[in-house]
Amino acid sequence: MPFTGPHEDRLAIRDLLDAYADAVTQCDAESWGATWAPEARWEMPDYPEFPPQEGRDNIVGLWVEAMKQYPGIMFQAWPGSIVVDGDHATVRSYTAEVYDKDGQTMRDRGEYDDECVKIDGRWYFSRRAFKNIHRQQGPKGI
């Protein structure tokens, strides 16, 4: 079953995912960074220009620079699976992004394989690994 564990924890992890998506759309580095555990890891193997990062400060630093390439982004995310085991969880989520770049409208869809950890009663991402599923581009606005 893709959704197991206490309902309150699964809801809190959904809130974490929503907070992450909102922070991306708002381009809010402070709120985005607050979704990560201090010793987290972020991997995006489909983007070699963004090497894996260890630690919240390094992750946020890379994100701030990366976001310069995604002006006006609209980012959505939803869970495909949340499996809670005590203070740890395994999550699979999907993303849809729309942004304009170089006169084109880009539509990216992807998948995150995540690990989350509960610290002092709050859930954080402890590891996120992203892969592309689909990319579409067309004239701006289409």
Image (tube, rainbow, N blue to C red):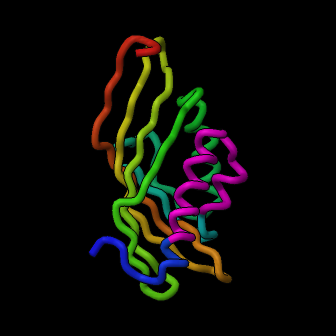
Front residue of 136 and 57: 136
Quarter of the image where one finds residue 18: bottom right
The answer to whether 64 appears left or right of 51 in the picture is right
Relative vertical location of residue 47 with respect to residue 41 in this rendering, above or below? above
Quarter of the image where one finds residue 39: bottom right
The answer to whether 33 appears left or right of 117 in the picture is right
Relative vertical location of residue 58 with respect to residue 22 in this rendering, above or below? below
| Place of residue 106 in the rendered image (x, y in percent of width and height, measured from the top left) | 41, 25
The answer to whether 105 appears left or right of 40 in the picture is left
| Place of residue 70 in the rendered image (x, y in percent of width and height, measured from the top left) | 54, 30
Q: Does the magenta portion include 57? A: no
* Count of numbered marks: 0
Residue placed furthest toward the bottom: 86
Relative vertical location of residue 106 with respect to residue 133 in this rendering, above or below? above
Quarter of the image where one finds residue 12: bottom right
Magenta stretch, residue numbers: 11-35
Residue at position x 55%, y 32% in the image? 73
Residue placed furthest toward the front: 7
Q: What is the chief secondary structure element of the magenta stretch?
A: helix
| Place of residue 50 in the rendered image (x, y in percent of width and height, measured from the top left) | 47, 44
- Image quadrant occupied by the N terminus: bottom left
Residue at position x 32%, y 43% in the image? 132
| Place of residue 66 in the rendered image (x, y in percent of width and height, measured from the top left) | 55, 38
Residue at position x 48%, y 88% in the image? 86
- Image quadrant occupied by the C terminus: top left
